[in-house]
Image (tube, rainbow, N blue to C red):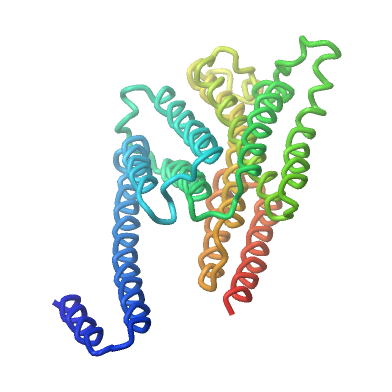
Amino acid sequence: GSQRAWGEAMCAELAAIGDPAERRRFALGCAGAALRQRTLARSAGTLACAAALVALVPSIGPTVPLMLILGLLLALGRRPGHLGPCRPGAAHGVRATGWALVLGLLATQVVDGGVHGLLHPAHAGVVWTLALAGLATAFTAATARATRIGESALATGLCAGLVTGAVGFAVLPYERIGTPLADSLPWHGQWLVGVVFAAPALSALITAARTRSSDQTVMAAASAGTLAALTVALLGLGSIVLFPHSVPDIVGPVMSPGTSAAARQAANATEASDPYAGFLVFGGLLALLLWALARPPGKADLKLLLLTGLTVPAVALALAGNAGTIALATAAVALVAAVRTRRGAAATT
């Protein structure tokens, strides 16, 4: 109805324009307006669908809704827009690695809950669903063709992130209080701590030398940190799920003597997973920062980035409870959003 009338009015106005150059500009303007309207409607429909799926989590658990949300993101990542398609080159590796980490975390949830847990109601699953869906969205958006992150930053960040994550997991106390896995290496593996700090720094230095851009250097470091934190989280949570009998006795001494072995093991697993949940939160915040840096600056980005920068740390606060880290991460994202938005506004005027 209204769209048809608008189209007919635009065609009539186009026919009244005689200058060819003016006709082309007018036609391009009409096409852009129509595309923006369709994109807005499609985005609203996607958000409504995702919100409906999240609303199902308390009644049927997080697994099935999260699978459907990830399937929706995969489909959007193949279509032109903010989420896709993926840039050629190293972006494919970063997107695939990010998605592999997200799917690995989802797999730990499925294995931990078993077949009977696939449709088990879980009110706390809303936070888990939002966290994994947000991570998948950030990786997809940061590797789309419209982003500013370059090939060098993506490649060096990917390599440094995987190395840092694997080495970092080996030098951390296993499952919070256990002996580090690197303890059997020469000098008890303490030399690996230097690798943990050297890999992201080397990634930033290589990117800086190749691109001569401070923005690309920061994005390389953010990419490395994101992948490293999520790698530690996946390895830690996966080890607790796959090797439950290796979890050390953390809370046993403070529990009542009559506590069952199953309840004691579940409480120990929960306590042992706390540090890895913290790495998951930290990786999510770095992914948000990477997305904020990679987005092309625009006049309308400030409100969106500030809203996201306040919402995601609030979810992270519910997961980790480390108010100081959350406040610092929020301030960093807000500062990046403000500076880049002002740059974008200045560039377009």
Between 87 and 43, the residue placed more toward the observer is 87
Single out the residue that lies furthest toward the right. 187
Q: Is residue 69 left or right of residue 134?
A: left
Q: Quadrant of residue 40?
A: bottom left
Residue at the image point whose x is 53% and y is 18% from the top:
258
Quadrant assignment for the N terminus: bottom left
Q: Quadrant of residue 41?
A: bottom left
In the displayed structure, would residue 198 be above or below residue 336?
above
Residue at the image point whose x is 53% and y is 60% from the top:
308
Q: Is residue 43 left or right of residue 132?
A: left
Please provide percent x and percent y for residue 78. 36, 45
Please provide percent x and percent y for residue 189. 80, 17
Count of numbered tags? 0
Quadrant assignment for the C terminus: bottom right
Q: Quadrant of residue 275?
A: top right
Between 286 and 255, the residue placed more toward the observer is 286
Residue at the image point whose x is 28% and y is 88% from the top:
17
Please provide percent x and percent y for residue 238. 53, 23
Between 277 and 186, the residue placed more toward the observer is 186
Q: Is residue 159 left or right of residue 306?
A: right
Residue at the image point whose x is 32% and y is 50% from the top:
55
